[in-house]
Amino acid sequence: MATGSPRTSTTGENPSGQRRRDAAGTRQLLLDAARRRFAAHGYTGTTVRDIADEAGVNVALISRYFASKEGLFEACLAGAVDELSHAVTENVTLDRLPQIMAEQLAGTGLGSRPNQFLLLLRSSGDERADQIRRNTVRSFAERLASAAGWRPDHPDGDRLMLRAQIALATAFGIVLLRSSTGLEPLSSATPHDLVAPLRDVVDGLLRERGTR
């Protein structure tokens, strides 16, 4: 005879805990699928149906978790800058920067998904989405510039920021060529292979003369 006591799962989780876990998993599936789609096809070339189908979930869940396609795109970009910023922290030194960049660009280590970089390269054709993308790239460039001593009130701030943006453009170019051309030996280069050339880039652009 039934006792009337609450049912529990065989794993010991209560039903509400199971739902919370499923919601988090579904949200992550949508983010992963959206990153791949946006990186490969751009903002306007990707539909919410494409994303939902790739994630294997109901398309209505995009509205539930992200409000809209724009909200999902913004969440993808926020995730990209969060992962990259975890790798390039505010306290990272110029000596460590080439190794960190090499790990990211070669697809290993923390925050290393090449799709993150490709996503930031994709122009959406949507004014709001492109503004989000520009802000994200600017934020990451500030991380690089900070490693060279840049601060908002730095007297030589514009020069340092330009050099950091050129270093970032070099990183984006590496990702683009590795992902789209099959150019060798760049496409199969390991982090170890990339460290020395990236050190030359960082030293040439961001390190002050006389401190190398």
Image (tube, rainbow, N blue to C red):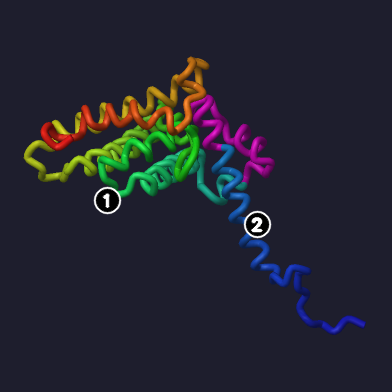
The residue that appears at 51% across and 24% down in the rendered structure is 188
From what the image shows, is residue 105 above or below residue 26?
above
Q: Position of residue 67 (x, y in %)?
A: 51, 47
Q: Which image quarter holds the N terminus?
A: bottom right
Q: Secondary structure at mark 1?
A: loop
Q: Observer-nearest residue: 47 or 33?
A: 33
The residue mark sitting in front, 1 or 2, is 1
Q: Amino acid at mark 2?
A: Asp
Instruction: Judge whether residue 93 is colored magenta.
Output: no
The C terminus, quarter of image: top left
Residue nearer the viewer, 7 or 150: 150
Left or right placement of residue 8 versus residue 70 in this view: right
Residue position marked by numbered label 1 in the rendering: 91
The amino acid at mark 1 is Asn
State which tag comes first along the sequence, 1 or 2.
Answer: 2
Whether 46 is among the magenta residues is yes
* Magenta span: 34-60
Residue highlighted by disc 2: 22
Residue 139: give x, y in percent of width and height.
30, 41
